[in-house]
Image (cartoon, rainbow, N blue to C red):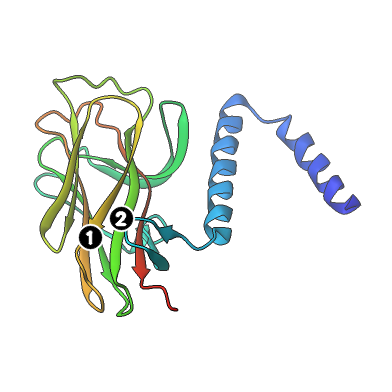
Amino acid sequence: MSHRHDEIEAISRRISDLSEESLILLSQYISFLKWQEEQWHSPEVWDEDSGLNTEWLFDLIEHFHEARQAATADPAGMEIKLAPASCGGVIRQAIWQHPPAVGMSVLEYQISVPMTIDLLKLRFAVGVRDGALLSTDNQVAFRLRVNGRQLWSHLKMDVSWESFTVELPSLAGQEAVLQLITDPLGNSRWNWAVWGEPQVIGFAFAED
C-alpha cells in the first residue's frame, strides 16, 4: 500500500508541472483509461427486448486500424481518426469522421459473425464536437449501412451526443460489411462529426 501511495505522490508532482494544454490531454487520456477498464470488467449484458444474453462483442474503436477508409468522390477535406471527443462538454472515446468537401466519407469494417449469435445490435452515440458552428445551412448526416443496405440515418446540427441502438440483420456465421458514413449534404464546413464508443453486440438464447 505504501508503494502505491508513493507512486501516486510522484505522479501528482509531475502533473503539477504540466502546462494547461498538457493537462487537457492528460484528462482525455484518463477518460480513455477509465473507459478501457470498464470494457475489460463490464458484466454480462442482458437485452430486455429480446430476453437474450450477450455472447459476443465487436468494438469498432478496437478494430479501427483494420477498417478501410474511403471517399465516394474527392477525399480532399476528409479526416478519419481515433481520439477522445467532447460534445456538449461530455468526453467519449470516439471515431472522428469529418466528411470531404465533395461526396461522403466511408469507414468500412469486415466482420465475421459467430454461428451462435441469434441477434445483433449496434450501440453507439453520434455527435458534433464542441466549437463547431453548425446551422440549418451546414448540417451533417450520419448513416449506417450493412451489406450495402442503409439501416439508419440521422441529421445533426448541434454540438451534443445522441445515443442509439440499431438492430442489425440476422448474420449468424456470415461475413458482414458494416459502413459508417458521414455526409456533408453539400456543405462540409464545421462538420466535426464523431461516433462515440460504437460496438456491435451479439446476443444468444440463454441456456436453461
Q: In the rendered view of the protein, which quadrant contains the C terminus?
A: bottom left
Q: Which residue is at a point 32% across and 77% down the rendered structure image?
A: 114
Quadrant of the rendered image containing residue 177: bottom left
In the image, residue 204 lies at what x, y percent?
36, 72
Residue bearing mark 2: 122
- SS of the residue at dot 1? strand
Q: Which residue is at a point 46% across and 31% down the rendered structure image?
A: 90
- SS of the residue at dot 2? strand
Quadrant of the rendered image containing residue 190: top left
In the image, residue 191 lies at what x, y percent?
24, 31
The reply to whether residue 57 is visible in this rendering is no
Asked if 173 appears above or below 46 in the picture, the reply is: below
Checking the image for residue 10, the label placed there is none
Q: Which residue is at a point 34% across and 47% down the rendered structure image?
A: 124
Checking the image for residue 168, the label placed there is 1
Mark 2 and 1 residues: CB-CB less than 8 Å, in contact?
Answer: yes
Marks 2 and 1, the one that precedes in the sequence: 2
Is 84 placed left or right of 7 in the picture?
A: left
- Which of the two residues, 25 or 196, is positioned nearer the viewer here? 196
Q: Amino acid at mark 2?
A: Leu
In the image, residue 203 lies at what x, y percent?
36, 67
Is 12 placed left or right of 73 in the picture?
A: right
- Density class for disc 2 (Cα within 10 Å; few <14, some 14-19, many ≥20) is some
Q: Amino acid at mark 1?
A: Leu
Q: Which residue is at a point 30% across and 55% down the rendered structure image?
A: 122
Is 62 placed left or right of 149 in the picture?
A: right
- Which of the two residues, 198 or 73, is positioned nearer the viewer here? 198
The reply to whether residue 196 is visible in this rendering is yes
Is 1 placed left or right of 61 in the picture?
A: right
